[in-house]
Image: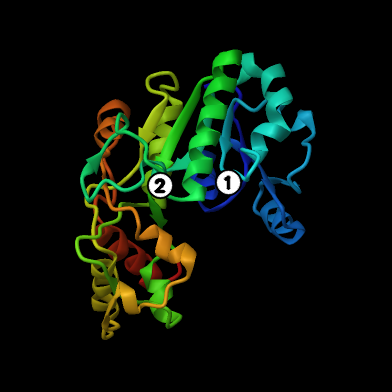
Amino acid sequence: MNGKRLLCLGYGYTSAALARRLAPAGWRTAGTTRSPEKARRLKQQGVEAVVWDGGGLDPRLSDDAGAILIATPPDEKGCPALRAAKQALADHARDINWLAYLSTNGVYGDHGGAWVDEETELRPTSMRARRRVRAEAEWRAFAAKHDLPLITFRLPGIYGPGRSAFDAIRAGNAKRIVKQGQVFSRMHVDDIAAALEASMRAPRQHDLYNLADDEPAPPQDVVEFACTLLGVAPPPLTPIEEAGLSDMAQSFYTDNKRVSNQRMKAALGIALQYPTYRDGLKAILKAENKPDQ
């Protein structure tokens, strides 16, 4: 791919994992953040950090950006990154080899625990998910107008170092909430980065991928396994009706589905490093316990 500069509009956990993966191949990374303090930390890490308050962006930010990752959540008006960068993207369309929009599998809504794939009907149940459906459509229309190689990735629950069941357990916040038949799909952040990188080599193969590992699982099973690895007693099982969840947390349990990753694996040719949450959690703990070199 020409133009080895990655521009991340919304530089967060997934963006950082992709940047780390691309760095050995000579990629440079630029990213936006709302926090001046975070921008200072990113600059110390070699990231071209730009403080962005959600308003207009300097069109020069996209200069020499052969790859662009959109990781900003939509608001009531749509995607803020599209509003801010559409002119710059249109002006540089011929130089952009890969344009990725990170969405969520929440757009599928509730399918009663059945498997869903990229062709499944969208049944968003929350305002957040409905905004994602709208943002996806806006990006598709914009990309089609300017012949941009847009790929939409529908992400599951993301976990990895510093963001896993271990952290909740150690903080005393872990719960084993039970809702009969409920499962969630999830994926280790490094496998997400691997899928994104693989798509960069074939940006027009498919314009939509579900990202997920091989085993959708009940959330209480993940917490129990993490406790076993740590050698601590798991928290008690709590029926969802007694869990005292916030409205937002409760809304995640409204949707029940198993997300298929078959297109991702077949088209991108990747083998997951962490095909289940058990593989991912064991690797995280092993890395934590590894002596400093």
Q: Is the C-beta separation of discs 2 and 1 under 8 Å?
A: no
Occupied quadrant, residue 120: top left
Observer-nearest of 247 and 2: 247
Colour scheme employed for the rendering of this structure: rainbow
Q: CA distance from mark 2 to mark 1?
A: 13 Å
Q: Is residue 234 left or right of residue 13?
A: left
Occupied quadrant, residue 208: top left
The residue under the point 34% across, 69% down is 285
The x and y percentages for residue 115 are 22, 42
| Residue at image mark 1 | 73
The residue under the point 38% across, 77% down is 174
Indicate the secondary structure of the residue bearing disc 1. loop
**65 above or below 40?**
above
The x and y percentages for residue 118 are 32, 31
Q: Is residue 253 left or right of residue 70?
A: left
The x and y percentages for residue 109 are 36, 46
Observer-nearest of 232 and 137: 137
Assess disc 1: are there few (<14), some (14-19) or many (≥20) residues with their C-alpha within 10 Å of its C-alpha. some
Q: Is residue 255 left or right of residue 214?
A: right
Q: Is residue 252 left or right of residue 92?
A: left
**Mark linked to residue 106:** 2
Mark closest to the chain's N terminus, 2 or 1: 1
Q: Is residue 97 visible?
A: no
Query: Residue type at mark 1?
Result: Pro
